[in-house]
Amino acid sequence: MRSVLAFIPLAILISATASAQIVPLSVWKNTCDLPWGGLLDGGSTLTAYSSATPAGTCTSFSETRNCSGATLSGSFTNISCTDGCTGTPWGAVASGYSNTAYSSATPAAACSTVAETRTCTAGTLSGSYTNTSCTDGCAAGTATWSTNCSASVAALSSGGSTSATNTASGYTGSATVTCNAGSYSYSGTSCTAASCTWTERTASGSRAWTEIASSSDGTKLAATVDGGYIYTSTDSGAIWTERTGAGTHGWNSIASSSDGTKLASAYLWTMTQSGPTSAYVYTSTNSGASWTQRSAGIYFGLASSSDGSKLVSGEYAIYDGYPVIRTSSNSGLSWTERSIPAIGWSPKPASSSDGTKIAFSFVGDYIYTSNDSGATWTERTASGSRAWSNIASSSDGTKLAAEVNGGYIYTSTDSGATWTEQTAAGSRAWGGIAMSSDGTKLAATVNGGYIYTSTDSGATWTEQTAAGSRAWEGIAMSSDGTKLAATVGGGYIYTGACP
């Protein structure tokens, strides 16, 4: 019979002869245990890595581990490795690393416009931008260094500067514009109101001029003479035509449609040996070539809608001393007397382009407004009861400007509900006043003084000394406010070209 020992494993026998210690199977077989599991045969080698995703190439983080006498050399514990990327803007990085790079560190725009995300994937870095930081520049845009002055500037890098000259209407100025991390800063700034260029229109003749009206483009003008005729011009005041069709009267008011074809003019009264008699409104539908006598009254002022169909007159009732307001919706063919609670005298009207919003100024009373072509009226007590002289309106009727004779100019931006005293122009013997279609530009005359203009709805004013100090009366303005025409009592008509 075979010996029982023949069936006892050698490893157990060895263990039994070594103080009962258990010897690993790998030692018995001369193999090495691997950190990641499994065995490595004796005399064999393999490559291990200190990191599976090193910040660089895998070869830089590798070592050869050898199995000898059941002992594994080295210490790296990763059997696999994915190359990172070297030579990147951030140095060596691991695969999967991402960061933002920029094509320029100081672009002439926001950094976001020159940015890209670069990602390392298995040794390959995407993208091409090399700047790891960026300071915002300033994109091309508008630089504004004061309320009234601004200009377009080219794109600037942070720290870059450029000179800018104002391009906003009505003012001259300049500034050095510097870009600081995406925002403008300014130095060496200036901003002053620009003066208009004035022309004495001697062709108009020296007369007792009173009021003047303008078409929306400023080319057609119509002016009245106290004790004379009405005169018209179709070339912005260079040449004037005497219109005898309406006769000679004490003309004191005139209104024009936006195209200058429809005119309406009136006078206060005719004085006779027995006293004053009623005057008339005259209308024209052919720019003053012919005239039609309309309603009788004692007139202080007229206003017209832009199409000339709606007219409003301010009159004086000689029988009781109260003002009379009348409106027409057919270019003066017929008139409707409107009830108004005013008690002041010398009523002067202003009208919106469509004729629905009307405002009246009175001497010794409040300003009154209507939103329904004169059917109903609101007493604007916020205006105060003053010696109001003339009033002007924007096209939509929301902006108003009114003068106090011997006082200030007042403005409203809510159709007369509230008023602002504009002291910047001073307290003066104001004459006429005109307003641009949008209400931002104003022009006012002083009898025995200068013409004053504003390009910010009356907040600031420019004394137009180039036109001279004269006995200024009426003034008219084109809808954009760039063309002015003003009358001098006992002098000529002057026209102004304004920025």
Image (tube, grey):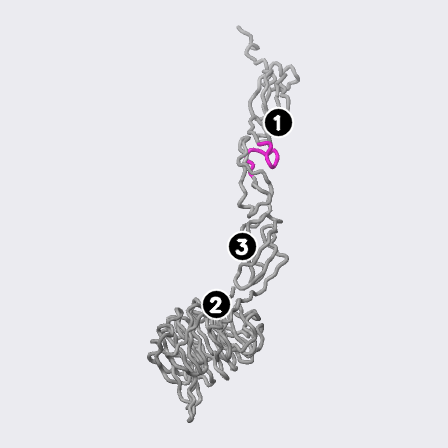
Check disc 3 and report the residue beneath it.
Answer: 152
CA distance separating discs 3 and 1: 56 Å
* Closer to us: 290 or 50: 290
- Location of mark 1 (residue): 60
Q: Nearer the viewer, mark 3 or mark 2?
A: 2
173 to the left or right of 278: right
Q: Name which residue type carries label 3.
A: Ser
Q: Is residue 93 magenta?
A: yes
Counting every numbered tag in the picture gives 3
Q: Is residue 90 visible?
A: yes
Task: Judge the density around disc 1: few (<14), some (14-19), many (≥20) Cα neighbours within 10 Å.
Answer: few
**Highlighted range, magenta:** 85-98
- Report the mark closest to the observer, 2 or 1: 2
Helix, strand, or loop for circle 3? strand
Give the residue pinned by disc 2. Answer: 483
Q: Please, which residue is most extreme toward the bottom here?
A: 274
The x, y position of residue 63, in whole percent, is 62, 23
Q: Is residue 319 above or below residue 106?
A: below
> Which circle marks residue 116 in the picture?
none
